[in-house]
Image (tube, helix red, strand yellow):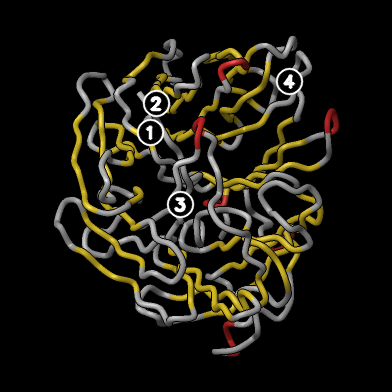
Amino acid sequence: MTGARVRATAGDPAADRPPHRRAARMAVPPGLVVALIGAVLLIVLSPTGDPAAVPTGPVPADQAWAGARRAETPGPMPDGPAYRPGYFLTLDTSVGTAPTPDGRQLRLVSRATDGTGRELRRLPITSSPQFDGFVAADGRLAWAESTVGSAGQARVRLWTADLARGDPPRELTADTGAVAFFNADHDMVIADGRLHWVAVAPGDEPATEIRSVALTGGPVAVRRERGAWALDRWPWLVSVTAGVEPVRLRNLTTGVLITVKSAPTEQLSCGGTWCRVSTVSGAGPVNIDLMRPDGSDRRPVVNGVGVVSVTDVALLDRFEVYAVGAADASLTAGQHLMAYDLKTRRTVDIVPDAGVVQARAGVLWWSTGRDEATVWHAVDLRTIG
């Protein structure tokens, strides 16, 4: 079964108040290599609009987030290889990947900050393995495994493990379709006892398959929707668009369809109840703001130049995370990591030298240092007052 993966973002659970989420540009790269689509946007924001919405200056995170829960995880595994977290089950326990000491296999491990943990899966490095789509509910973790065979054929399989009980992982299905992942918080969603994901439908006309399988296993249910869509908080879909096309939102339960409007010179990326708006000119983006989906409450975020650090817009409908001083905030070490807090209307100075930056399920994490000196830092954004 062939799979393909791309990138997008996240939403809002209210039944008739839809999530308005970032529009991603869709592509189907060969070999299941996940790629961020399009050039990294340079953020140049001018202090326009409501003066009260403009931050007066960055506040150190230790001061702004004094009561937040934090944790640190050493970069190297006890047996030497580098560890990279992909999801935090709790602030003190993450799931991530590390090669074996001989470099022949890639391991998926559950790891606590005190060094304890266990191996969940391992795949040969020669199969170009990737682990993606992490999601957890009620102590159960689900994820996707992709491999490439010797003849170049790609395969995606979905797995689950009850980490609370310590049961061994088991395969849910290999009937995944051409999987579409967006490096976002809702690439896969657990709802109503089922694991949900989207796949690119076959055919000449753009269409999306909304697929699901029971967490106990069994046949895969498939629902086809015209157009290119990504998952958001269940039961919402968000359109996958390019350029200045409008963002559409669709409720799979009620059928409600909503279009988020923007000016011809603006590009939208929406998440939760906020949208990231890039105003473009012939020379490129000239400012990026946050606004409500109806266009109200528009606020400048950054006074300076930076890049977006995570796909999802306004984490927890509150924190817009970005970096300054790096050409690519997702890959380049030495980023000055910042956040704009919509609740307090302040800019928060997180760390001047972040490497890789990610966020899932209310936890933001980043790396500092290199090689044996690498440390993973995590903050639970849900614990910020």
Mark 4, residue position = 77
Pointers 2 and 1 in contact (CB under 8 A)?
Answer: yes
Q: Give the secondary structure at mark 1.
A: strand
Identify the residue shown where x is 75% and y is 29%: 74
The numbered disc on residue 140 is: 2
Mark 3, residue position = 8
Return the x and y of residue 320 as percentages of the image width and height.
57, 63
Query: Could you tell me the amino acid type at mark 1?
Result: Ala
Q: Give the secondary structure at mark 2.
A: strand
- Which-is-in-front pick, marks 3 and 2? 3
Query: Could you tell me the amino acid type at mark 4?
Result: Met
Query: Could you tell me the amino acid type at mark 2?
Result: Arg
| Mark pair 2, 1: CA separation | 5 Å
Mark 1, residue position = 137
Query: Could you tell me the amino acid type at mark 3?
Result: Ala
Identify the residue shown where x is 36% and y is 34%: 178
